[in-house]
Amino acid sequence: MRGLPGPIRNSVLSIVRHPLRSFLVVLTFALGLASVVAIVGTIEGGRRTISHDLEALGTDLVAVINPLKLGSLSIGVRTEGRPLEQADVTSIQQQLQGVTDSVSPIRIDLGLSSTQRGTMRHTIIATIPEFISVLRPGMLAGRFLQHQDRWPTDDSDETPAAIDEALAVILFGDPVTAIGQKVRCIRDGRGFNARILGVVKDPLLLRQYMSAFDSTSSARSIPARRLQFLNLYLPWRQNQDQPQLLLVDAPGIDDVEEIVVRLEKIIAREKLGVFLHVQKTWTSVVLDIIDRFSGLGHFIWILDLVVVLILTGTISLLAIDESLEEVALRRAEGATVLEVVLPVLMEGMWLSLAAMVPGILIGKLILQQGIEPVLGWSSWLPPRMIVGTCFGLLMTGILGSMLPALRVAKLDPAAVLGGRRDL
Amino acid sequence: MLVQMKQIRKCYGEGDSLIAALDGVDLSLDQGEFVAIEGSSGSGKSTLLQILGCLDRADSGTYHLNERDVQSLSGSEMARIRNETIGFVFQSFHLLGDRDALANVSLPLEYRRSAPPTVSPTQVLERVGLADRITHKPSQLSGGERQRVAIARALVKEPALLLCDEPTGNLDSASGHQILSLLSELREELNTTLVLVTHDPEVAARADRVLSMKDGQWI
């Protein structure tokens, strides 16, 4: 300790000589940092999860939708004209050949499926094999529908089908054992048997958090099931099925604009009355909203540090009153203003540094034990945010010492030592 | 001439409440001289001591210490003079309660910018008769012993000017006599100029010269 420069030595000695005061300041800093970590971790984790989920839905998809509403959510602005028909699908497929991965017509029906485990109401999607391009690698167990998979001519024969993982869990228990199994279905008032060829994994991977979502959703009167993908995929019946939706899969996100321009021209030329839904645009709008929410979060954590600043500043201000006589004596014995001010600022700096590791650890504990199980998403602390928050705390520590330092700087040693202490 | 003050004026307050604590004071001190300043409370003697000790500045007038114009010095230059040239002994001792006698005496050396003094804090403590109290904290010392520590703290700097503000004011009669004797001895040994502020005529009588002050002026 003797080898250290005076201001450093005196600031450390002041901490050591006032253990309770130092502990309280460190605790205030640590709890403040912990709450900042919890706020930032929750917001950034939620932002990342939602971004991931939106991207998992496919930002390179464009949907041409026949006039309909999906639930209560209207999509886009409808163009004036006639509805989309099978002939339009073939025409669009030909016109976009080579610039898309796939152009898949889709028919969506509500259906009912039964196995020995029970009966489940769900959506049935009829589409073509090219729809597989929408599925990301690793999302399929078994296989998807292929061109040889067709509706049987005999009603007693089995229809080849693929199934969403969440629906497979409900109907078969273990999705792995679903492949090859038979399921009795009803669509459009007509019963048929389906044989499962493949299981499509949940693109949002929500199922691992489903129990948390169930409880959270129930509490907020949101049907949890809407967060699941519960589809049975069946072969498209040429000349029978009418497209409710045309799903265009662009090769990449940068190709979306060109495809949209081409589609708009086709829609205008053919006078189609449809909604054109561009997933990339919708995703960016949602992410923009989330970014605004993130900004609000940053405001909250800055406010949090201001509260810590006020608290520690008050503690330091009260504490410096006890030390004014010592400061005056040091000034009388030859200390310059800087030599008595620096230890005060440094003390705040050391205490905030000491609070950083415990603050981050407490914050992570709050995230892991308190927030993640309730919200159902993983928290995330970006390294730049950790560095920024720690820097913010360091500044808070120094700023919190500014008032006491100012008091020390303006101290009149003659007044204190002469007993004229009117401070 | 160690100290040369001319027409020193120092006022407190402003407007109608302006009070002249010092009103045109002249003072000259030779090296090794023992001067007592007496006066009633509020006469300005403590203010004079603070200006002499470079703890405060005069509003007007000139003050030369060792032929340096103190009035023109910066704050850090005044701090350096306090550290190297001036020793203080206060009525209330002003010892750091959580540090032992040795640490208290060593305090001025923390701010020493020039060559260290020729005597160590331990030697000074031995000289003031506290060889066996070096590791004692102020609360473990008597009033007289505390003032001895304060004197040792002032002397460890080997000051040319030793300023004592009623050093016996908080002591019993016997301890007060011992402290005054010690100060006299040290002044002769070190050839230090000793300025002692008191309102006790008996204490003032020990000085080479006694100056009396009233309403900020010599009488």
Image (cartoon, grey):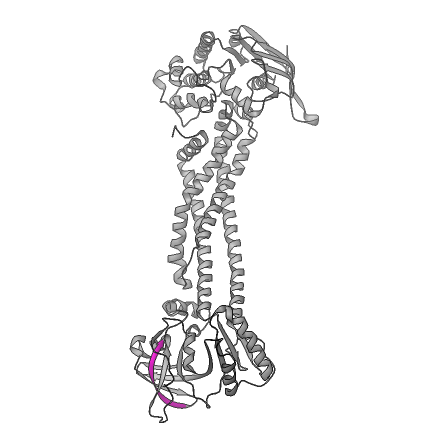
Counting every numbered tag in the picture gives: 0
Task: Please tell me whether the stretch drawn in magenta is mainly helix, strand or loop.
Answer: strand
Residue A310 or residue B75, whichever sits in front: B75
Residue B88 appears in the picture as rendered: no
**A54 w.r.t. A66: above or below:** above
In this rendering, position of residue A342 left or right of residue A192? right
Q: Is residue B27 visible?
A: yes
Indicate whether A76 appears above or below A49: below
Q: Residue furthest right?
A: B16
Relative to residue A255, is residue A162 drawn left or right?
A: left
Q: Is residue A197 magenta?
A: yes
Dividing the image into 4 quarters, which one contains the N terminus of chain A?
A: top left
Residue A92: where, in percent of width, then height? 52, 82
Image point 46% across, 82% down: which residue?
Answer: A106
Residue nearest the viewer, comparing A391 with A293: A391
Q: Position of residue A362 (x, y in %)?
A: 39, 51
Placement of the C terminus of chain A among the 4 image quadrants: top right
- Quarter assignment of residue A201: bottom left
Between B197 and A115, the one nearer to me in the picture: A115
Picture coordinates of residue B16, whole percent (x, y): 70, 26
Q: Position of residue A239 (x, y in %)?
A: 46, 90
- In this view, which residue lies farthest toward the bottom? A154
Along the line of sight, the residue nearer the viewer: A373 or B180: A373
Start and end of the magenta stretch? Answer: A190-199
Quadrant position of residue A135: bottom left
A352 is higher (above) or lower (below) than A104: above
- In the rendered image, the residue lying farthest to the top is B208
Magenta segment: does it hold A265?
no
